[in-house]
Amino acid sequence: MTALTRPRSYGNEEDAIAMIDRHGKGNVPPASPEPRDELIAVRGVSKSFGALKALNDVDLTLRAGEVHCLLGENGAGKSTLMGTIFGIHRPDAGEIRIRGSRAALKSPRDAIDARIGMVHQQFMLVPTLSVAENIILGEIGLFQAARNPARVSRLEGLVREYGFDVRLDTKVGALSLGQRQQVEILKLLYRNSEALILDEPTSVLTPAEVDKLFITLRTLVARGMGIILITHKLHEALSFGDRVTVMRAGKVVATGVTAELTRPQLLDWMFGQSTGAQSAAGVLPTAALGAPESGLSIDDVSVAADAGNTVVRSVNLRVRSGEIVGIAGVSGNGQREFAEAIAGVRPLSAGSIRLRGNRVDGLRPRALRELGLVYVPEERSAGLAHDVSIGENLTIADYHHRRFTRLGVLRHKVLREFSRGLAERFNLPIERLAKSVRVLSGGNQQRVILGRALAHDPACIIASQATIGLDLATSVYVHETLRASARAGGSVLYISTDVDELIGLADRIAVMFEGRIAGVVERSDFDKNTIGYLMAGGQSAT
Amino acid sequence: MSESLTLTEDSRVRLLNAIASASLLWAVLAAIVLGSGLILAAGLNPVDAYRRIFEGAFGGLYQLSVTVRFFIPLCLAGLAVAIPHRCGLFNIGGEGQLILGAVAATYVALFVPAPAYLHIPLALLAAGAAGAVWAAIPALMLAYRNVNEVLSTVMMNFVAAFIVQYLVRSVWRSSDAMFPVTADFPDTAQFATFGATMAWHTGLYVTLLALVAAMLVVSKSSFGFSMRILASGAQVARNIGIPIRQTIVIAMLTGGVFAGLAGATEVMGVQHNLSPQFSPGYGFTAVMIAMLSAGSPLRVCAIAFLFAALRNGVSFMQRTEGVPSAIGQVIIALVVIFFAVETAHRYFVNRVRAR
């Protein structure tokens, strides 16, 4: 990580903007001086999925000889844009030009023929075949021998030329994830790809492998290839890229030359004027806080991800009764696993959690709910059972309870009354409770999830990104609901990547970086620069 | 995608459901039309052939009783697949569980002396337990070791088939039979037929009881609700704390019990002994029945009846018109294929629209 002196004020921003082609400010996308340099030019591309506008009038240029980082939060539209370039999605409007001529990509096959290659996050390799077989898999006929000497010697040449450390006859299943990634890149080189798209390539790599990837990419662009690297990590964009394009909510915010960019600027572009968080910042006289041990106490908690690697490291945190504590951080820094661990969905690998003085780590979600700890997960789809009705969804966390089940038999009438009561309390359409939950808008789906979570006035709420994709009114409603719960003596832990939202909602903000709490900022010291600095891996002053 | 849906699309959802329910009818019609071509190609009159199928299945009390005789194990075996499918599991091992059920029933029938009023219940109990044990092995492997249940249940079928071969060919073989078969069951362990010359038997009560039980589990029990939530997605089930392993194991065990009972009704109601090939693949037909019925026990009942009628009618057609029964089997298969194509088509169209 390169040293960053101090979070700077935004005084230099204007200069920086002058140096970059900021989109949508009357600045015409520059007619490239040497159009033959343009490997890929995306012009005015829009793409909608139903009512969701995934891409909105997007421009992007990939030049030969550059690593172009595409930076943005999850859901910003990065993957959709790459899918469009790679022929997976067809744009609703706009055009894609490849080496100056307009291309109609109908499938990934067309993109490959146009010498565009993509390394997906999930590798597309057959573990039981050798490296060489995997690479030539697409081009050999049914009865041709895989070990064609000409092909193999060409592959060996490529391996030597670029310094890959894989043997061609090893089975892919025996390779590390970093080596598999090399095989994917080798495959693209073998197909003479000139433009490479790498989707979050470092997410599976160890630090040493990241360094190696960096060297490989530099070698490739030195030979005139162009690389688009998708990432949501700031420091990667700054260290890997020649240029950076930032996307947010389906739009390109800006493109800049890496050498002229700073972290605060990128943060501002990524999280800028965010939606849904303009609600009543600072107006709340917060409820009287309880004693430090009155709410949720998290001590030395470490958590492993699904792959077994530790992603939350010795976190200590108190959420007192009556308090809303925000967790800020660029996504993928362990927040999700942290939330799941507290919610009893994921085991702790170390540490302890207490709620109002009682140990609750190791308890399952049903037992935690009984004790008053509830969880609102990051994705709404993970909080709703899509095959059951709206009314039933309000009961799925409680139906097993003695009040609703006698001798294994559901008491439908009691359940219906219960869900009607909740629907009334949380403004859900009562006459539609028997309908499928699929017909609800995102806002109403979130009301179902919140209503279920708050049904028994919990002592502690763990909520993650609960306003993502919601309109302002519903976002405000969600915030108000959480505040009301805190005022009534609850503890709220709210995880978000949106700093503005947290500043508007939380009493304190803890910033997570690489699985640790990089710093805790009190409401009186709330400042986007400070928080952004911590989010980017800066050290807390204290 | 769910976020983009609004309440106005509710009617569209209902329309799609209506089409889905009707598509089985279309599949049957399409199979009849294409089957006509085959029958014509065999040099026969399709109208006559189809009339014979209908007569064979429903043309008289005896014919109806034979249809019901096939319905008894088919419905039970269909439930054995449909119940686990309620929580998203594919129990392809119905055949193996059915065989083990028949083996257990045979053991009780032949070697456990019991008074008349206890013999049948004991045999059924043993059969249900044996089916459950056979289902428990893949269920536990799935719940605790994440072994794909499709593969493990298929494999268990082979093991079961060879167990019955071994038993009937060696230890249980009746000495006075030319073929490998056990001795006949005592009367106390046989389901009586309704009417001396009829094929239907009191095993029908077992099927009907199982059907009612399955309907209650699905619609009234908290366990049935857990299964539906789990079918909606493991993620939500995990987040709200549904006991996932427990639900998987119980669902599979319930399926195993139904399959075991199916085996028992066949040997105690129809064969009255155990031979290696006593089941003409009821457990496999059951997979088709369950898939066509989308997990609803009542639809399992209806579709199992349709399959029983087709099977009976087709063999009648073969005997009276000389239409090879292979053609009849092809017609049954066509129904399934057309239905599957229709379902897949709708799925595909939806995906393309989403692009």
Image: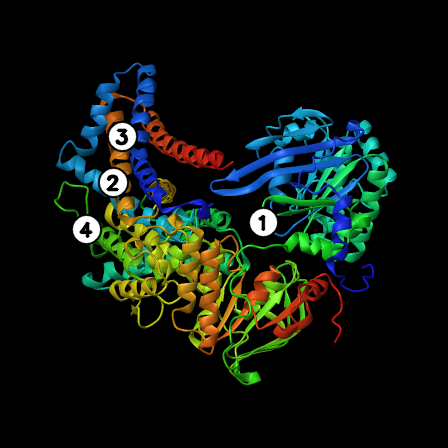
Residue type (three-letter) at the residue carrying disc 2? Phe
Mark 2, residue position: B305
- Helix, strand or loop for disc 4: loop
**Mark 1 belongs to which subunit?**
A
Q: How many numbered circles are shown?
A: 4
Q: Quadrant of residue B342?
A: top left
**Mark 3 belongs to which subunit?**
B
Q: Are marks 3 and 1 in contact (CB under 8 Å)?
A: no
In the image: residue A284, left or right of residue A266: left
- Of the image marks 2 and 3, the number of the one nearer the N terminus: 2
Disc 1 or disc 4, which is closer to the eye? 1
- Helix, strand or loop for disc 1: loop
**Mark 2 belongs to which subunit?**
B
Mark 3, residue position: B315
Front residue of A298/A402: it is: A298
Disc 3 or disc 1, which is closer to the eye? 1
How far, Cα to Cα, is label 1 from label 4?
Answer: 61 Å
- Helix, strand or loop for disc 3: helix
Say which residue appears at 48% left-offset and 59% top-offset.
Answer: A475
Badge 1 crowding class, 10 Å Cα cut-off, few under 14, some 14 to 19, many 20 or more, is: some
> In the rendered image, which quarter contains the N terminus of chain A?
bottom right
Front residue of A47/A209: it is: A47
| Residue A368 picture location, percent across and down | 47, 73
Residue type (three-letter) at the residue carrying disc 4? Thr
Q: Are marks 4 and 2 in contact (CB under 8 Å)?
A: no
What's the mark number on residue A341? none
What's the mark number on residue A75? 1
